[in-house]
């Protein structure tokens, strides 16, 4: 974990929209899970630029997409290109269902380092059991298109990977899926999730993540390493649904560094280090990560 006396925000996860084109049952979509209805919104390039220009200490990684589909925002490639111009060597990632690619040349020109694709099937039938509303063939065509153009311009970026969430219905497809995606030049990571309400009916019977978060020095490292930002600029220490009523700041109103070092973030860290049992950290009390002492797969 980060040096507690010199904490650096390693990763920012940012949602540049609050909508998604799919309806996955365990999706952490805030509106669906909390009933907190919001009008659809896209973060503008100008808002994003202002936020980036105010950053003093850049994180190592910026991931686009946490709870919603980032490729819905057509300014995303311009945002990534701007970031890469500001900070050489920055790790940029798009977390997507890849049903909506847009311009492949804009994607390549943005110089995004990696694209992480949520896909947990080997054909339309197995894919749409969880990725409701998605089209498996479109995803595969988009993977092939990106790989084709990367080869054409002799670029190794963006690296493509698939996150295959292992459920009860697809547990038997893991080896086949790995072979299928590897054939397309795509690495596969297997995950399972017990983070969001309703997971019990979906849990695989046998699969466990090798890196399940147990026996770590504190139960939750999130507020010590990263921040989540939503399309309204609100900042959170994590993506837990329990914490959505407790933003720790807003990047449209204050610089990121100020939020990271602010009193609300410090209160949450103190709470997790067992120094205090009140204030901003109270939302953690209801979170499965805290309740299970870190033993959860996300
Ligand atoms: S314990 Fe849960 S609510 Fe608290 S910071 Fe960690 S993931 Fe978020």
Image (cartoon, rainbow, N blue to C red):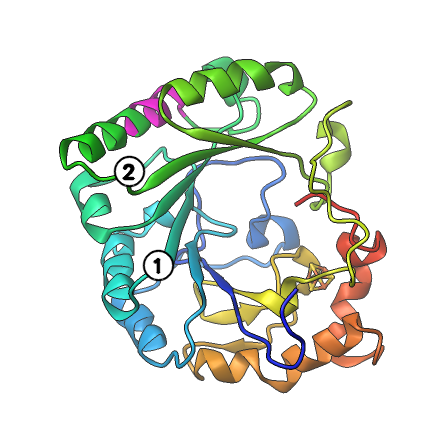
Q: Nearer the viewer, residue 185 or 31?
A: 185
On the image, which quarter does residue 61 sit in? bottom left
- Decide if residue 226 is on the left or right side of residue 54: right
Q: Position of residue 82 (x, y in %)?
A: 24, 64
SS for dot 1: loop
Q: Position of residue 227 (x, y in %)?
A: 54, 66
Q: Is residue 244 magenta?
A: no
Which stretch did the figure color magenta? 135-142
| Image quadrant containing the N terminus | bottom right
Residue 187 left/right relative to 105: right
User: Which mark lies nearer to you, 1 or 2?
Assistant: 2
Pick the quarter of the image with the C terminus.
Answer: top right
Residue position for label 2? 101
Vertical placement of 198 versus 61: above or below? above
Q: Are marks 1 and 2 in contact (CB under 8 Å)?
A: no
Residue 42, numbered label = 1
């Amino acid at each position: 974990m980060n040096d507690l006396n010199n904490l650096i925000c390693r990763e920012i996860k940012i949602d540049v929209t609050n909508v998604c084109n799919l309806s996955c049952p365990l999706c952490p979509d805030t509106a669906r899970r909390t009933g907190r209805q919001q009008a659809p919104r896209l973060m503008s390039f100008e808002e994003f630029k202002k936020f980036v220009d105010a950053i003093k200490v850049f994180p190592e990684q910026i991931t686009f997409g946490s709870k919603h589909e980032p490729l819905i925002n057509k300014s995303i490639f311009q945002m990534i290109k701007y970031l890469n111009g500001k900070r050489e060597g920055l790790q940029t990632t798009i977390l997507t269902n890849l049903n909506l690619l847009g311009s492949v040349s804009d994607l390549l020109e943005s110089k995004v380092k990696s694209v992480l694709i949520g896909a947990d099937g080997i054909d339309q039938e197995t894919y749409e059991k969880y990725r409701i509303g998605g089209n498996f063939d479109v995803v595969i065509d988009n993977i092939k298109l990106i790989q084709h153009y990367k080869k054409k311009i002799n670029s190794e970026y963006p690296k493509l990977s698939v996150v295959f969430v292992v459920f009860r219905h697809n547990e038997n497809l893991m080896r086949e899926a790995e072979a299928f995606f590897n054939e397309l030049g795509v690495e596969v990571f297997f995950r399972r999730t017990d983070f969001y309400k309703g997971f019990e009916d979906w849990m695989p019977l046998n699969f466990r993540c090798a890196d399940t978060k147990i026996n770590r020095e504190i139960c939750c490292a999130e507020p010590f390493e990263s921040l989540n930002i939503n399309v309204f600029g609100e900042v959170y220490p994590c993506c837990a649904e329990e914490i959505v009523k407790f933003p720790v700041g807003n990047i449209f109103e204050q610089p990121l560094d100020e939020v990271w070092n602010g009193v609300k973030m410090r209160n949450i860290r103190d709470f997790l280090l067992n120094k205090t049992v009140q204030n901003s950290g109270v939302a953690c009390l209801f979170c499965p990560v805290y309740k299970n002492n870190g033993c959860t797969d996300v």
